[in-house]
Image: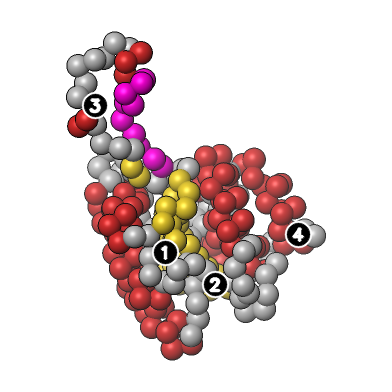
Amino acid sequence: MTEFNKKKSFNEFFEEVSPRLGVRKISFRKIFNYLDKLPDPITIVETGCLRIKDNFEGDGQSTLLFDVYTQFRGNNSKVYTVDINPQATKNCSQVVSKNVHIETGDSVGYLNKLTKIFVDKKITPSLFYLDSFDLNWRSPEESGQHHLKELVSIKSILNLDTLVVVDDSPISGYLQESEAKKGNLDFIPFGLVPKPTISGKGYLIHQYAMQTGAKLLFSNYQTGWTGFN
């Protein structure tokens, strides 16, 4: 158990570390505010675990945040995390408590196996946090495809309240009409300019979500949806 786990409340812990979360601060707060409304036990599944101890600014330390949060929730609240890098899972195991189940392997295969376990044990997932495939911002296709595969692997066990969050998925927009006119860019065919959308790792998941009626709950640097099933 880490020293952070000795705090009187999760909010106290979060307020202490949140200034170090950078662009992820707002969306992590929204994640935990949402989970506060869900019944115990809280079950969190994460792909891509904590890789470097105390690297809040770079990676966000999501596994540690989820670990501490579940310890302030009811009995049997738990975190499941997977990473393909054995050094990452080793480092993670040295930071988090026994509340976190850690596996090394491909996330898509892991999620398929975990889905069957959840069905057999009638476990209802509270949060899926997808962050397993490093993103090339200039060419996001491979990462986006991988995260869509992860969503497909878990879709059968999602319910209306399950929160699905993808890291590195900010809103991406084009010039708005009012902004463009200020620059006298009247040649832009505004009727053809697409609306802002989700970029990065979650861009394909967002397209799928909008076509299947899922709800975009928030989008900052991370994006979250509910209502996939």
Residue highlighted by disc 4: 9
Q: Earlier in the sequence, mark 1 or mark 3?
A: 3
Q: Which residues are magenta?
A: 170-179
Residue highlighted by disc 3: 190
The type of residue carrying mark 4 is: Ser
Q: How many residues crowd around disc 3 within 10 Å: few (fewer than 14), some, or many (20 or more)?
A: few
Residue 137 falls left or right of residue 68: left
Answer with the quarter of the image where residue 72 lies.
bottom right
Alpha carbons under labels 4 and 3: distance apart? 50 Å
The type of residue carrying mark 1 is: Gly
Return the residue found at the far top: 184
The answer to whether the residues at label 1 and label 3 have Cβ atoms under 8 Å apart is: no
Residue 83: image location, x then y, percent:
42, 64
Q: Earlier in the sequence, mark 1 or mark 2?
A: 2
The answer to whether the residues at label 4 and label 3 have Cβ atoms under 8 Å apart is: no
Residue highlighted by disc 2: 43
Can see residue 220? yes
Residue drawn at x 63%, y 74% is 40
Residue drawn at x 39%, y 46% is 169
Q: How many marks?
A: 4
Look at discs 4 and 3 and give the one toward the viewer: 3
Alpha carbons under labels 3 and 2: distance apart? 45 Å
The type of residue carrying mark 2 is: Thr
Alpha carbons under labels 1 and 2: distance apart? 17 Å
Who is closer to the viewer here, 152 or 178?
A: 178
Alpha carbons under labels 4 and 2: distance apart? 19 Å
The secondary structure type at the circle numbered 2 is: strand
Q: How many residues crowd around disc 2 within 10 Å: few (fewer than 14), some, or many (20 or more)?
A: many
The answer to whether the residues at label 1 and label 2 have Cβ atoms under 8 Å apart is: no
Residue highlighted by disc 1: 227
Residue 57: image location, x then y, percent:
55, 42
Residue drawn at x 51%, y 57% is 50
